[in-house]
Image (cartoon, rainbow, N blue to C red):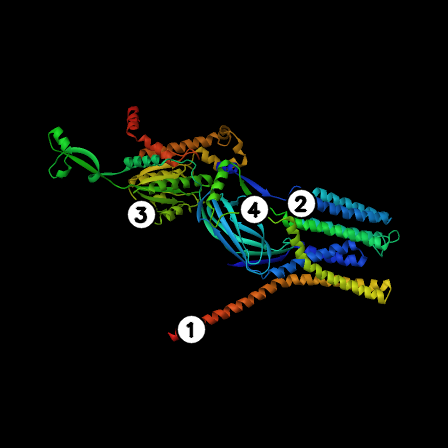
Amino acid sequence: MRFRDKVFEDDWEKKEIKMQKFSFLILLHHLFGIAAITLILFQSALSLNIYVFTIWMIIGIIILFFDVTRGNKLTLNGELIFSFFFVFGTGLSILLGDFSSMFFPHSLGRIEIILFQIFTGTFLVLRYTTSLYFIEFKSHEGFYVVPTSSYSQEQLKHYQDNLILTDFERKKTSEDRLAKKWFFLLQRMLWPAVIMLILVLFAVGYALIIYFIIPDNSIAEFIVRPSLIVVAILYTILLLRTHTILPEIVDRKDDFKEDEGTSDDMGELESEIELESTI
Amino acid sequence: MLEDRELELTKNGKGFILFGSLFVIIGLAIDSYVLIIPGIFFLMVISSTFANYLLTQKSEIEVGLRISKNYMRSRGLLAVSVQLTNNSNRQVKLKAALRFSYHFQTIDLPEQVFLQLKPQETKKLVWILIAVRRGNAEVGPIDLDIGPFQYLFKQTRRIDLVEYIKVLPQRPRINIPWKTKKELLLKMVHEFAKRVKGRGDEFFALRDYMPGDEVKHIDWYATARHDKLITKEFEDERNLHFLIYLDLGSNMFGPKFEYALSSVVELSSLIQGTNHDLAVIAYGDNVSKFIVPQLGKNELKLMLNIYDVEATGVESNFINAIKFTKSNQLLHSIAIIFSDLEGDLTNKLQGLHLLKTMGSRVIFVNFSTMDFNILASPEWAIDQAQNMAYKDIMENVFPSIVKDDYRLREKKIRQILYSIGGDYVEMKGYEDNIILSLYRLMKKYSPSQRMVQQALGR
């Protein structure tokens, strides 16, 4: 280390912005995950199938282990791994359980199953939302320096005092409140949610009509669900297509702008030529 | 204002689409709401990012960047103000990030700031940066990340506003009073100036009146005392020509060179305030820069030129620099050489002889002392020698052979310097100062000191 670096380190302290060591949001995130797993475990226990129960038990332990070891490091990759475990567990429990549903319908009523599943799904969504929020606002990294010695503190203070009434005067920038940030995120998701709701309502209405006209479950199984699956696939394709098209839209608009610009230039040129001819 | 837009669906975003469709399809197939609900959520998030992009892509954000100064010293502070104006009718939420070169670090505020801009609203952000390195630094460009979920769908606008700043080396730690500097200059002039007898301003001596001398110069008091005509004799003081040689060779690198450079600047700024001539010759293999600071409007600009000098990788050739001065007729000057004792020493010795033939007075400033070499040597970094005592370093890092060789070289150069009537100055480390060293040297030339020296037979 050079002497001057030593002097610098005495005067200024380097502060890194890292993910918070403990955050209420992380606790919530873990709690939602645990709640979802417990509900599914409870349901699988009620299904009275030892294979299904052990599978979810193992998966639950693995997820809990991941959560504990990762601690405060929330990443989207981790969340995707978490969701992969859910797909994996479901697949295994289909193989070892019943064909028609995820769990045995003999010991549980259909409405009970739906209720259990909806609650579990909601907890999962809450977990994802908290993690998305955390990654969006709490996990940015970087560093800055803070004056520590009296010399550097005075240097900074004098400098800031001299900046008063100039362009460089510094006022405290206050960050938005938590509620405001949440509101912003929800606001962004409002319109897509409405569109999705309309789609789902259409599907439900379609299903109800079929139920009323042909009161047979088998037809619903063969018509409604495949149609919804097709809708999902189509929507996925639409999303991927939109992603590829978006930059093209921007480029095309720029082209139009350039065209307008050139026409203006041409006009100016023409007027100049006219002026010259008059002179 | 040039704008560069970047748009990318990230790996995670693609994962979200994949998992969304997988969840929904499998969930529908097996009638499992556990999968359907999160699947819809995944798709919804991605749709929201696309919708946000379509809504905000038209919104125009005007950005202005200003900095408080164009050149500064290292360890100094710089204020950067960024003004953001939302010209659209839609509220925009964004993350503004200021990019800057490695010469700076931010104080109290991170590089990225979250902002919310209402329609037609203007917000001003002020960063205060501290310069940690010297060089040609730049502030800018500015990155604006618009909208949420940047981890899924990256939507960045890079605004090409770049400001260039020259960061000079830091202020010297020793503040030498102006009185000392003036005294040093006077002493140097007194010692080195070539005097021409005859007409001038400075009184030299009294002598007998000779026919042809001007009557107005007759000293009447002395004439009365001695009872014969006695006249005053004057002398003319010519301007001194200072030539500063700065070694840019491969042996002068790192902190040692930085220190030599700042010493050159300190000395040249001292000389520049007087009516003496000054030229700085920065030489590597050949003369790479010849700077003549002048009085006037461009004075500062020329001074700043010195800071643009960088050490070259090749071994320096002192003779080439001397040849350059000879061809440019820079004779009878005071040559102050900022160099070291490493590398090819015979080259330097020959160069000093050449200087003597050109009628120059030579002052050799040696930057090759133990302190500098320790800091520049790789052993310092490897052995974590900063935690060791100085004595241990001298014993471990510097074997006795090196020390002996160093002493031999010093002896050689001292011999040559004394034979040509030059002087040898050693910079004893970072706490030493060139002005103080020269002051010490000039004290040797004071009349009383000279008497002592003569009495001792030196």
Q: Nearer the viewer, mark 4 or mark 3?
A: 4
Give the label, 2 or 3, closer to the camera: 2
The numbered mark 4 sits on a residue in which chain?
B
According to the image, label 1 marks what residue?
A: A273
Residue A144 percent location from the top left of the image: 55, 44
N-term mark: 1 or 2: 2
Q: CA distance from mark 4 to mark 3?
A: 54 Å
Residue A102 is at least partly visible in this image:
no
Kind of residue indicated by mark 4:
Pro
Q: Nearer the viewer, residue A149 or B267?
A: A149
Labelled disc at residue A73: 2
* Residue displayed at 10% across by 29% down: B227
The amino acid beneath tag 1 is Ile
Mark 4 or mark 3, earlier in chain: 4
Residue B11 lies in quadrant: bottom right
Q: Are labels 1 and 2 assigned to the same chain?
A: yes
Query: What distance separates the C-alpha of mark 3 from that of mark 1?
Result: 56 Å
Q: Residues within 10 Å of mark 1 (few under 14, many from 20)?
A: few
Residue A14 spot, x, y in % from top left: 55, 40
Judging by the rendered image, the residue that carries numbered circle 4 is B110
Reading the image, the residue beneath label 3 is: B328
Which residue type does callout 2 highlight? Lys
Q: Is residue B418 left or right of residue B207?
A: right
Other residues around mark 4 within 10 Å, as few (<14) / some (14–19) / many (≥20): many
The circle drawn on residue B291 is none
Crowd tier of the residue under label 3, counting other residues whose Cα lies within 10 Å: few below 14, some 14–19, many 20 or above = few
In the displayed image of the protein, which residue is found farthest to the right?
A106
Label 4, label 1: how far apart the Cα atoms are: 54 Å
Distance, label 2 to label 4, CA atoms, is: 20 Å
